[in-house]
Image (tube, rainbow, N blue to C red):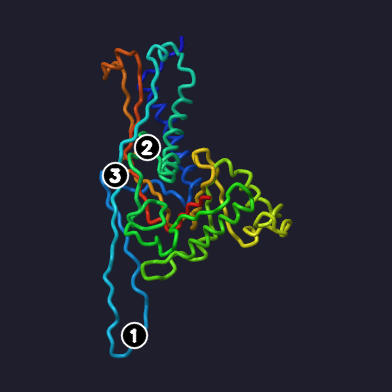
C-alpha cells in the first residue's frame, strides 16, 4: 500500500505550487499592464501617506535691481490603506487518506491565478467606478481631489488646464477609422495639459508609447486601426485615402491594445501614455507578503467536525492613484 501523505506535508507542497504560480502570474500581470499599473511597492503601515511636490517656478528674466518673484512651495499628500486579502484551498481528510485528492495541485495553482487577477479586477473596477464588495470598498480619488477621469479638478477648475480635462467625448470606437481618430484626439488632449506654472505637463515623446484598453466589441476595429500595415479605409470614413500606409506605424507610435470583457460599456475605452518604466497612474503596495496557515483536526474544532483540511492564504495590500496626467477616457 502506498504511503499516505500527511496533511502538513501536503500543505507545504500546495503552498509551493501556489507560490510558483503566484510569482509567475504577478509578473505576467505587471507586464500586461505596464505603463498602467505598478505592483510590489513597499509599505510598512496600515495607512500609508504619499506625496509629491509641484513643479518649481519657471526660470524668468528679472530686471536689474529687482528681486525675483517668489513662489510658495506646494506639496500634495494623499493616503492609502492596506486591506486584508484571503484565499484558501481545502480537501476532505478521508480523500487524502484514501489517495482520492484528484487534481488538488491544480486547485492550488488556479487559486493563485485567481489571486493574481486581483490587480486586473481592481484596475477595471477603478476605471469604471463600479461598486464591488469583494474588491476595494471605495472608488479612489486622485491627489488633485477629483476622480481618476474628470473634466475638472477638486477645486472645480479645468483639469490640467484643459477644457474637458482627461475625458474626450464625441468619438466613435466601433470602426477602424473611428478608433484611430479617437486615439489621436486623446494624444492631442494630453499635449494640451499644463502644469501649475502654465508649462506643458506632457512631452511629445511620452505620447509615442501608448496602451489602449478597449471593450471586446472593438476587437475588429482595433485590428483594422493598428495592426494593418496598409489601411483598408481612410482615417475618417468616406475619405479617399484608403490604401495608404498605417499612420501610427509610419509615425513611430508603439501601441499596445488590450481587449477585455471587464469593460462593460461598448462605447468607452481608455488610453495611457508613457514609457513602461515611467510614472504610472495606479499602484499596488504590500504591507505583508503572502502568508499561509494550515488547519486540520489537530488545531481546529471546526475542521475536525467537518472532516476537512485546509491551507489559508493571506496578505495585506493596498492601492493608490497617482496624478493621472497620462490617462485619458474616451467616449462617444
- Residue depicted at x 41% and y 27%: 14
**Residue 156, quarter of picture:** bottom left
For the residue labelled by badge 1, is the local secondary structure a helix, a strand or a loop? loop
Q: Earlier in the sequence, mark 3 or mark 2?
A: 3
| Residue 84 in picture, x, y percent from top left | 31, 36
For the residue pair 69 and 59, the one nearer the viewer reads as: 69
Q: Is residue 53 above or below residue 5?
A: below
| Residue 95 in picture, x, y percent from top left | 42, 13
- Residue depicted at x 27% and y 46%: 44
Measure the C-alpha gap from mark 3 to mark 2. Answer: 13 Å
For the residue labelled by badge 2, is the local secondary structure a helix, a strand or a loop? loop
* Of marks 3 and 1, the one in the foreground: 1
Q: Which residue is mark 3?
A: 81
For the residue labelled by badge 3, is the local secondary structure a helix, a strand or a loop? strand
- Residue depicted at x 40% and y 62%: 160
| Residue 199 in picture, x, y percent from top left | 42, 70
Mark 3 crowdedness (10 Å alpha carbons): few <14, some 14-19, many ≥20: some
Measure the C-alpha gap from mark 1 to mark 2. Answer: 54 Å
| Residue 85 in picture, x, y percent from top left | 34, 35
For the residue pair 169 and 27, the one nearer the viewer reads as: 169
Q: Is residue 234 above or below residue 84?
A: below
Mark 2 crowdedness (10 Å alpha carbons): few <14, some 14-19, many ≥20: some
Q: How many marks?
A: 3
The residue most toward the bottom is: 64
Mark 1 crowdedness (10 Å alpha carbons): few <14, some 14-19, many ≥20: few
For the residue pair 162 and 144, the one nearer the viewer reads as: 162
Measure the C-alpha gap from mark 3 to mark 1. Answer: 46 Å
Residue 62 got which mark?
Answer: 1
Q: Earlier in the sequence, mark 1 or mark 2?
A: 1
For the residue pair 23 and 158, the one nearer the viewer reads as: 158
Q: Earlier in the sequence, mark 3 or mark 1?
A: 1
Q: Which residue is mark 2?
A: 135
Amino acid at each position: 500500500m502506498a504511503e499516505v501523505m500527511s496533511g502538513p506535508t501536503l500543505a507545504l507542497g500546495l503552498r509551493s505550487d501556489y507560490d510558483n504560480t503566484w510569482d509567475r502570474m504577478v509578473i505576467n500581470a505587471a507586464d500586461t499592464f505596464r505603463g498602467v499599473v505598478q505592483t510590489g511597492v513597499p509599505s510598512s503601515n496600515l495607512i500609508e501617506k504619499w506625496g509629491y511636490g509641484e513643479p518649481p517656478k519657471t526660470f524668468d528674466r528679472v530686471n536689474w535691481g529687482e528681486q525675483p518673484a517668489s513662489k510658495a512651495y506646494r506639496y500634495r499628500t494623499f493616503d492609502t490603506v492596506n486591506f486584508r486579502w484571503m484565499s484558501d484551498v481545502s480537501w476532505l481528510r478521508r480523500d487524502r487518506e484514501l489517495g482520492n485528492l484528484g487534481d488538488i495541485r491544480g486547485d492550488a495553482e488556479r487559486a493563485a491565478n485567481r489571486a493574481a487577477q486581483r490587480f486586473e479586477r481592481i484596475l477595471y473596477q477603478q476605471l469604471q467606478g463600479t461598486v464591488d464588495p469583494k474588491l476595494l470598498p471605495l472608488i479612489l480619488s486622485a491627489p488633485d481631489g477629483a476622480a481618476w477621469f474628470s473634466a475638472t479638478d477638486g477645486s472645480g477648475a479645468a483639469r490640467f488646464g484643459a477644457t474637458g480635462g482627461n475625458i474626450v467625448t464625441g468619438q466613435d470606437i466601433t470602426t477602424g477609422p473611428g478608433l484611430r481618430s479617437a486615439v489621436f484626439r486623446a494624444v492631442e488632449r494630453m499635449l494640451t495639459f499644463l502644469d501649475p506654472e502654465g508649462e506643458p505637463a506632457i512631452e511629445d515623446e511620452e505620447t509615442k508609447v501608448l496602451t489602449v484598453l478597449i471593450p471586446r466589441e472593438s476587437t475588429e476595429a482595433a485590428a483594422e486601426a493598428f495592426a494593418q500595415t496598409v489601411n483598408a479605409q481612410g482615417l475618417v470614413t468616406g475619405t479617399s485615402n484608403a490604401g495608404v500606409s498605417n499612420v501610427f506605424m509610419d509615425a513611430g507610435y508603439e501601441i499596445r491594445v488590450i481587449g477585455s470583457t471587464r469593460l462593460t460599456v461598448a462605447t468607452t475605452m481608455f488610453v495611457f501614455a508613457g514609457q513602461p518604466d515611467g510614472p504610472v497612474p495606479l499602484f499596488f503596495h504590500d504591507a505583508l507578503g503572502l502568508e499561509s496557515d494550515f488547519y486540520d483536526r489537530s488545531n481546529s474544532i471546526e475542521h475536525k467536525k467537518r472532516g476537512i483540511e485546509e491551507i489559508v492564504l493571506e496578505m495585506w495590500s493596498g492601492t493608490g492613484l497617482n496624478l493621472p496626467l497620462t490617462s485619458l477616457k474616451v467616449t462617444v
